[in-house]
Amino acid sequence: MEYFVAVVEESSFTRAAEALHVTQPALSHQIKALERSVGGELLERLPRGVRLTAMGRAYLPHAERAVRSAAQARRAARAAAGAEGGELHIATVHALAVGVLPEFFARWRREHPGVGLVLHEYGTTEALEEQIERGTADLALGPAPAHWEGPLVPVGDEEIVIVVPFDDRLAGRTSVRLEELSDHTWVRCAMEPLVHGQPLLDRACAKAGFQPRTAVRTEHTSTAVRMAAAGVGIVCAPLHVVRGAIGEDCVALPLDPGWRRALAVFSRVELTGAAAAFAEMLRDSQPSPVRTHDDCVRARPVVA
């Protein structure tokens, strides 16, 4: 299966053999043996490359999952004894990769220097759940899935806030109601969460009696926050993404009533060894405090 997946990924027997460090005849022999075992051709040999047959297209996703599961099993076995040795693959959405994981990765490296970390980032929760189902990583960190059949460990929640420029008329407030933002323009992000197929912000603003006016659309939440700091528009974003920008050029305003989303570590298989240790670290840790608008004003240098 590993050889088959490699040939598909490389679109070439020659390149696949080089990547796998085997001879091309040995690779071809294994592929033919695989095809005999499934009862038909999986690959169509072309003068320049290869192409999946109908059987191959049906077989490929299962082969990919099996190969990833085997690699995951090896990593879990190496890391089972005290979370030492091996490698831990973690999947998450971009906002959590930027806003939450750096400090946890730094702590992990201090406490478990023998376990390497590999981060897989995705733009949406749908993509994250799909990839963890396919066995891309050992565990996922993200918004808690509504229906998940495997292990799931709650690790707190994330607060959704409104980001406004430091000189915005609302910047000194302790909270803001959504309807008070009807006259603002917005920076929208492609990674915005969806509710029943509709962006969360559109649904919420509609309930508040207005339609958000979009100034700019971005791909990443972190980019949208920097746009807000520059005065392009306001942004709806998780507080942990905004944390590093507060006190420079923007302010995070909690919504009234507040918006929160539960976070969880989840996996296809039981969390053991390094995976269990990482989940426990996330569950037991508290986020760093966030400075308020008044803190930022006091911290700013006085210009004579």
Image: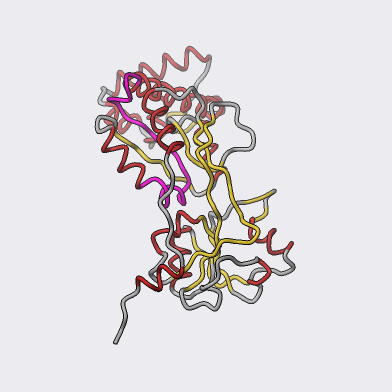
Q: How many marks?
A: 0
Task: Determine the residue positioned at 47% across, 78% down.
Answer: 167
Nearest to the observer: residue 178 or residue 46: 178
The magenta stretch is 80-102
Residue 151 x %, y %: 53, 27
Residue 127 x %, y %: 53, 42
Residue 26 in sight here: yes
Residue 46 in sight here: no
Nearest to the observer: residue 120 or residue 32: 120
Residue 253 x %, y %: 54, 65
Residue 38 x %, y %: 51, 15
Task: Determine the residue positioned at 34% across, 37% down.
Answer: 118
Nearest to the observer: residue 37 or residue 111: 111
Q: Is residue 248 left or right of residue 25?
A: right
The C terminus: image quadrant: bottom left
Q: Is residue 113 left or right of residue 230?
A: left
Q: Is 236 placed above or below 287 here?
A: below
Does residue 241 show up magenta in the picture?
no
Q: Is residue 33 left or right of residue 263?
A: left
Does residue 87 show up magenta in the picture?
yes
